[in-house]
Image (cartoon, rainbow, N blue to C red):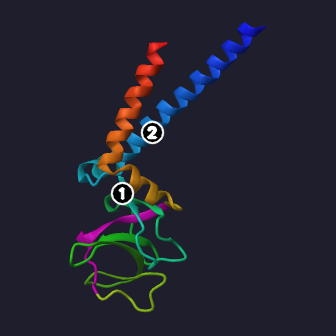
Amino acid sequence: MPNEVIVKNKFNKTKIINFIVVAIFLVLGLNLLTTKSEKMFDIVGYKTYTVLSGSMEPTFKPGDLIITKNKNRCNIEVEDIATFKNTKGTVITHRIIGKSNEGYVTKGDNNKVEDKDIINEENIVGKVVFNIPKLGFAINFLSNPIVVAIEMILLSLFIFYYFKE
């Protein structure tokens, strides 16, 4: 009977270690996909951003993670929420409220007036297709180089501990 308890505890310990190792790999993989690499964006077709302001509330709140589909893989239309670069090069996500020969007219859902810049087609990054509340702040934290180094050390320790037994 005591041997069965030991085996059961060892099994649970192995399951926990396996879960932690897989979770760390998932976090590292997510970090890779959420980098600012334009090449990765072209290959995968999606890019993540963290909402930093309240201009799109209640649709998106600060800290939400938004997933933007590459503009070359979707149609951008009036009423879509698009991620774009303004004339200063700042990445912004707002709703498209109009379109003209000059470009797109945009406005944050929580803003009283439309954005002053007309956004040209080449400045559109893509269309927002999904969001995950509050995950953006967590991803930003986990993407910090110091935290990534700690993740790698922990992963190494777990792998070493796992194969030691």
Left or right: 45, with 85 as reference point: right
Residue at (38, 39) in percent of width and height? 151
Circle 2 residue: 26
Residue at (36, 57) in percent of width and height? 73
Q: Residue 77: x percent and y percent?
A: 41, 73
The residue sitting at the bottom extreme is 113
Compare marks 2 and 1 and give the one earlier in the sequence.
2
Viewer-proximal residue, 58 or 97?
58
Callout 2 amino acid: Leu
2 vs 1, front mark: 2
Viewer-proximal residue, 128 or 146?
146
- Mark 1 lies on a secondary structure that is helix
Circle 1 residue: 73
- Mark 2 lies on a secondary structure that is helix
**Label at residue 139:** none
Viewer-proximal residue, 66 or 51?
51
Q: Residues within 10 Å of mark 2 (few under 14, many from 20)?
A: few
Residue at (59, 25) in percent of width and height? 15
For the N terminus, which image quadrant? top right
How many marks overall? 2
- Against 141, is 85 above or below? below
The residue sitting at the right extreme is 1
Q: Residue 47: x percent and y percent?
A: 36, 56
The residue sitting at the front extreme is 2
Which residues make up the magenta segment? 117-130
Distance, label 2 to label 1, CA atoms, is 26 Å
Residue at (21, 79) in percent of width and height? 87
Callout 1 amino acid: Arg
**Residue 57 covered by magenta stretch:** no
